[in-house]
Amino acid sequence: MSIDQSACHVLEHPSRLSLHEVSDETLEKAARIFRALGDPSRLRLLTILTQGEACVSELADQEQLSTVSQRLRTLRAENLVSRRRSGKHLIYSLADAHVVEMVVNALAHAGELPLPDNT
Amino acid sequence: MSIDQSACHVLEHPSRLSLHEVSDETLEKAARIFRALGDPSRLRLLTILTQGEACVSELADQEQLSTVSQRLRTLRAENLVSRRRSGKHLIYSLADAHVVEMVVNALAHAGELPLPDNT
């Protein structure tokens, strides 16, 4: 269906939308978060972490540790993952419930995972 | 804290992670969704739509309708928004609950909106 650009005029609508409720700064920050999520390899790491925290060597699996460390660095820069040291292990986890929700919802929206049970 | 790349070895960990549970195709699809979300202007449109459906002329507000239509086209391509015609109005809405959740969680994670009440 084609868009008729002269279809209607904004003044015909009640001004019910608070267009500027969210600040530009918050939108830019949220967009940066989404861009950090917008890479299949980084998203794979986050998907693994939805199952629980993991050591960097587990996350690296068959890949170069330096490659995985770079991806984790990008995710940490947007506060999507947290890191702690436990003895000789570097343990990564998802930063908070928002991140879990974003990843789970994107995978569900991508169509191959069921909607989580009201979480 | 610096990363000691020889800190531990994957074989020291129990193989509890299902690394390949999510297909590459799903990860690529989810990453594309995140990239569509990773733009402040498109995100602004989605933020408005979290308050309810809106006609394209409302969404355009002070902007060029063609610019807004292009953004909406990108969002529709990833099935993030739906469109229906009602008389002379083109009404847009968020495609489903996953999209609402992703946007709300990203804004909350960006730090200026409170966590939604158990939604």
Image (cartoon, coloured by chain):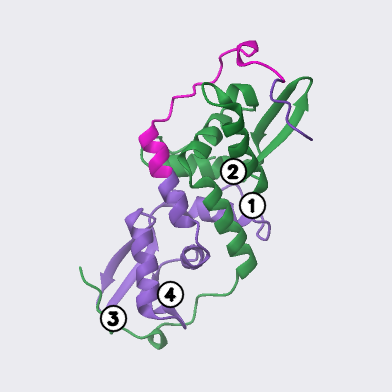
Chain colours: A green, B purple
Magenta-drawn segment: B7-30
Discs 1 and 3 share one subunit:
no
Discs 2 and 3 share one subunit:
yes
**Hey, what amino acid is under mark 3?**
Gln
Which residue corresponds to the image point at 65% horizontal and 15% vertical from the top-left?
B9
Mark 4 — residue?
Answer: B59
Disc 4 and disc 2: Cα gap in Å? 28 Å
Secondary element at image label 2? helix
**Hey, what amino acid is under mark 2?**
Val
Viewport quadrant of the N terminus of chain B: top right
Q: Position of residue B50 (x, y in %)?
A: 49, 62
Relative placement, left or right, of B45 versus B81 is: right
Q: Position of residue A98 (x, y in %)?
A: 60, 46
Q: Residue furthest left?
A: A1
Q: Chain of mark 2?
A: A
B43 within the magenta span = no
Within 10 angstroms of label 3, few (less than 14), some, or many (20 or more) residues? few
